[in-house]
Structure formats: structure tokens, C-alpha cells
Image (cartoon, helix red, strand yellow):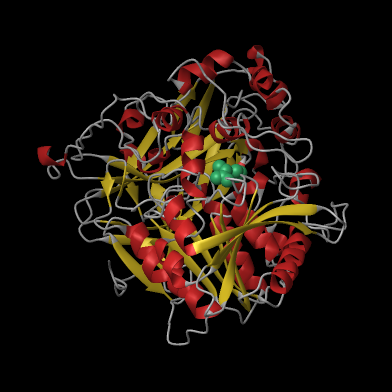
Amino acid sequence: MLNILRLLKRFPTTARLLAVLGTSGRVHGGAGIEATAFEIAEHYTKYEYRIPMRDGVRLFTSVYVPKDASVSYPFLLTRTPYSVAPYGPDHYRVNIAPGDSFLKGGYIFVLQDVRGRWMSEGTFIEATPQRADEHADANVDESTDTYDTVEWLLRHVPGNNGRVGIWGVSYPGFYTSAGIIDSHSAIKAASPQAPVADFYLHDWYHGGAFMLLHEFEFLTGFKSQEGPTLPPKIRFQFDPGTQDSYQFFLKLGPLANASRYFEGKGGYWEASLEHTTYDGYWKARAIWPHLKDIHCAVLTVGGWFDAEDLMGTLRTHEAIGRNNIGIFNGLVMGPWVHGAWARADGRRLGSVDFAANTAEFYREHILFPFFEKYLKDRVDIKLAAAYAFETGTNVWRQYAAWPAPGAGLRTLYFQHDGNLSFEAPTGPAGDNDSYVSDPGRPVPFIGYTAFGLPQEYMVGDQRFAARRPDVLVYATPPLEVDVTLAGPVSARLFVSTTGTDSDWVVKLIDAYPEDRYAANDLVAQPPGGASRHIDDVPPPPTVLAGYQQLVRGEPFRGKFRQSFERPIPFVPGRVERVDFTMPDINHTFRRGHRIMIQVQSSWFPLVDRNPQTFVNIPTAQMGDFQAATQRIYRSRLEPSGVEVSVLPEPASAAESP
Ligand code: PG9
């Protein structure tokens, strides 16, 4: 046990994966929280199969069948690249279900290693292209593998009721989405959760900027394999030799120097740096354009503070709704980091308290009823189309759709002297604020030392950034009434740079009053010092009076301002428009708080550094990295700001936990 704890401390991704996916021991929180392998063995019999696909490849599949054979049960299937371990019919997994209720609720749980991963045969391809895609070249894909699996299960596993549900978090969320395209008629319900929807647009790149920390952390531990193999006991061997990722990546220098960490790992890192634009390689791997012919009810689940797959969730929900009129297309968005809804209580994140066990509420009162309704004909169960947790006020809202109907688009404009308002600026053309962005001294994304991606940065205190000369800060006066922003957020900037390329990072922040939330709101420091290793631990002690809580932040690489396919340079000094979309929010800025926006040109090492010269960044040399003077215009003709979705009046509160 001590070894597991040490491993979790050292490798945050491991911590998240083990917690979401389960091991043969008891792990903190989540699906099967109270269950142990022994208890599962008491109530279920485990079988292992190698299920043949239409091309002869056999996929390793574990099936847990309830011992009570007096009734028939639906299947609950999850397909994963992360292993269905433990292997062997006598070795029972802890986390076989998406929540405790399912364990008592009567389901046949099925877990499958996807093609080319662990004990399954075949070749693994990153985000398997759909065979229908113009860039693909195969007769099988994840849709056919899911179809063939379902067909086989129905015929070979006795005691089933002829219905199948499918679910998965993150990468397994991708397999869930793919599995319901042109779905098998027995699949009645699906829950893609934080699904990977488009590696370029939403995962490895955001706004064309390379998400260095996430990709580095993930791919140092994700390798290709030759033929079926058991997973190693310890999955992630990378040791950075420091607890400070800012220093680690600064010392590493240009991105090209990182390649030594990925030798022999399957070429995924190399491929993502070879394809810096939205080209055929990425388009073939985008699942969202293919989300058609879905014949089951869908509940897409995600977290407002998911540092990995927030946009994938929203994109998946939107695409399914647009292309599949008539099916139930639900959405749940809670105040959670990546996958936390499946494992944690959801009570707090970093310094922010959500006043209730939001994840437990979701598992018990939304997810479980969803599968019960569609897999067991529970017509008495009623579900809202959208459950969106409203941060700031800490209530669940139910909406007839997402984005929240009735929200109106308005722009928060940058004004002189750091002001921010819904009134457009009136000053003469050329009015601007400027700063010098130096790639040798990039703006950090957290104000403390950590290695890896501490997920609490998504609500992290931004005061450390506001004090830097290379960060612009705009804020409203203290609000006289609550302001709820529910829906899309977009940056609309007029900019110039003395360089030929530049990143623009926009952060929407809830600035707490200075005179409230005083000493007793100090967040206790966890044992073990200030370094953050695991996503669920709070940051160092914070005084919440004056706290600048990140509500939403997003980078954009300026050379993609016309398209993600064809980058173009900036002409030094010329004013240009840069518009980009940020993930939706559902947040109330309380009376007395201020709405704040910060603008900067680096966010390191969350995002790799832009050299600020128009070059191919993965092969850039030290000399390509140049300081540049950046200007943000705020005049009548060049009104920079952030477009938000404002809810006119308080929505009616849903059942609150
Ligand atoms: N961190 C994993 C991942 C997220 C997004 C893209 C690819 C991988 C995961 O949790 O599956």
C-alpha cells in the first residue's frame, strides 16, 4: 500500500488513471468506492473471453456476472486502452462499475481491452479513424469492434436481458462515442464521459497551442506494444528529477530537446509534433463529425474544471444533438476535474468549496437512474436534458437544453485604467495597453511549485499573475447584483505584436471582495509541504479575501487566426483581429465580487512557449525565441473584449444535494 501511495504522489497521471480505472487493491473514492475485490467475488462470477472480431482479431474481455441467476440483467460495457487488469478468472477487479448503486443494481459488467492494447490482439492506432472517414484506410474501427462485441455477448453470455449500456471516461469515452455510431440495436444507453472528441482541437492542442504539460505527462507513460502482453506492475517510469515543472521545461529549452524522453514509445509524441496544424492526420482522428446514426439514449458527462477534456465533452454533446434528432441527448456538467465524478465526493477543488458532495449526488441521482431507465424500462424515471452545476452559488440547475436557453450574448469590453464593462469603449483609434512578452521568462500557470498538472489550477488563485508586468488586468467595479454567465465564452481581441507570431491567453476570473472571506477561510495546508502532486489536494494556504479564482482560461496561437489548417505570420505592428472560442461556463459572480479578465502571452509550462517568430515551433532553435511588445487595443474602432452568455434572471434551482 505504501508503494502505491508513493507512486501516486510521484506521478499524478498514474494517480488519476488508477483511481478512475481501478486496480486489484482498494483505491480512494469512485466507482466501487466501498467494494473490494473480495466483496465483488462474493456477488459476481468472473469470466474471461477472447471475443473474435469480423477480421479474426480477438479482443480480451472480462465479464462479471451476478451470482443471483433468478433474473436477467443488462450488460454495462466499457472499452479501454488502459487495461482491464487484474487478469485471470480468479482475480477480481475493484472498479467494475461507474458507481456503487450499480453493484447492487443488477448488471453484467463487461470490460474489454481495445484492439492492440494489453491482452487484446491487433494493432493499436491512436484514436482509431472511423472507416468511413476520407482519411482512413481500414475495414474495421471502434464501431465495428463494439458491434461485434455486443453481438457476441448477446449470444454467449446467459442471463442477459438483451440490452446493453456503454460508458467510459476520457480515452474510454472516445471508445464509447465511437461505439454508438450506427449503433447495434441492443445498445439502449450510452454515457461518454470527458470523451476525447478531437485530439487537435481539444486535447493536445488548444487554439493551435501545444498543451505541453498534459501531453508530456501522458505520453511519457503511454507506449505502443507488440502483441498481447500483461501490463507492468508499475506503469509510469519517468522521473523528472525535480519537483518544479517550470524550471524543468525552461531548462529543457526548445521543444525539440524533449524527444529523448519518448524514444521507443510508439511515435505518438513525434506524430503530434509533426502535425502542428489541423491536417488529415488529426481530421481522421476526430470522432465528432461521425457521431451520426445513433439509436440509443445518450448522457454525456464532464467537469467544468477538467484540464484535459472539457471541450471534448461539450463538442460531443453538441454534435450528437445536431445529428440525431429524436433521441434523448442529456448533458451533465459538474464542478469537477478530469474523471473526478467517477471517483471522488466532489465537495471541493483546491481552495474552492462546492458546499455538497456533488459527485456522489450525480452518481446516485443522475447516472444510475439514466441507465436504469433505458436498460430496465423504468418509465417512472424522469431526467432533465441538462444538469449544470452553477459555481459561485453552488446549486445544480436543470435546463431544457445546453447552452442555457434565454442567455443573451453580451461583451465585456476592456477600458482605460484597467476597467471592464458591458459598455463599448469610446476612445480614439489606437488606444491600447501593452506589455513585453519574453519567452525567456514566461508567465507561469500556477503560483507555486509543482511537477505535473495540478488540476486545481483550473480554479487557481491568479493574484501571482496579476502582479506581473507582462499580464494585463481588467476588472469591473464590485457588482451590485449577482451576474450569472451560462453558456459559451469567446475572446474578441484587436492586437498587434512586434514579432511575427504570438500566443494570446485570456482568463476570466472571479475576484472576491477584499473585506470578506477573512482569516477563518484560510485553507489548511495538507501534510507533505507545498508541492502539489495529486489533483485532489488543495494548493498552499490561501486567504480567500481578494482571491482571484480562475473561472475559465484558454490559449490561442495567433498564427491560426484565419484557420487551423493554414498558419499565417503577423506583420509587426499591424493591428489584427484575433477571435477564439473558450469552453462554456456556468458561474455566478456574486454581488460584491468583481468580474476580471487577464490577458498574457504565455502560460508555462501548461502550454509550450511561442518563439514569437513565425517558425515551425517543434524544430525552433534558441535564437528563434524573441521578446516582443504586445498591444491590446480598446478603442471605439478596435473594441477588444470577451463575449459571454448572460442569464437575465435567476434560474429555478433543481433538486440540490
Ligand atoms: N489523460 C488521458 C487522456 C486525456 C485526453 C486525451 C488523451 C488521453 C485519459 O484520462 O484518458
Q: Say which of 372 and 27 sits in front.
A: 27
Q: Say which of 358 and 286 sits in front.
A: 358
Q: In which quarter of the image is the N terminus?
A: top left
Image location (x, y in percent) of residue 526: 26, 32
The answer to whether residue 637 of the structure is visible from this angle is no
Q: Is residue 363 left or right of residue 605?
A: left
Q: Is residue 255 above or below residue 18?
A: above
Q: In this view, does 244 lie above or below 320?
A: above
Q: Say which of 642 and 332 sits in front.
A: 332
Q: Is residue 89 above or below residue 230?
A: below
Q: Say which of 631 and 403 sits in front.
A: 403
Residue at (51% x, 36% y) in the render: 14
Q: In which quarter of the image is ligand 1?
A: top right
Which residue lies most toward the bottom here? 379
The answer to whether residue 604 of the structure is visible from this angle is yes
Q: Quadrant of residue 395?
A: bottom left
Q: Quadrant of the C terminus?
A: bottom left
Q: In this view, does 96 lie above or below 277?
A: below
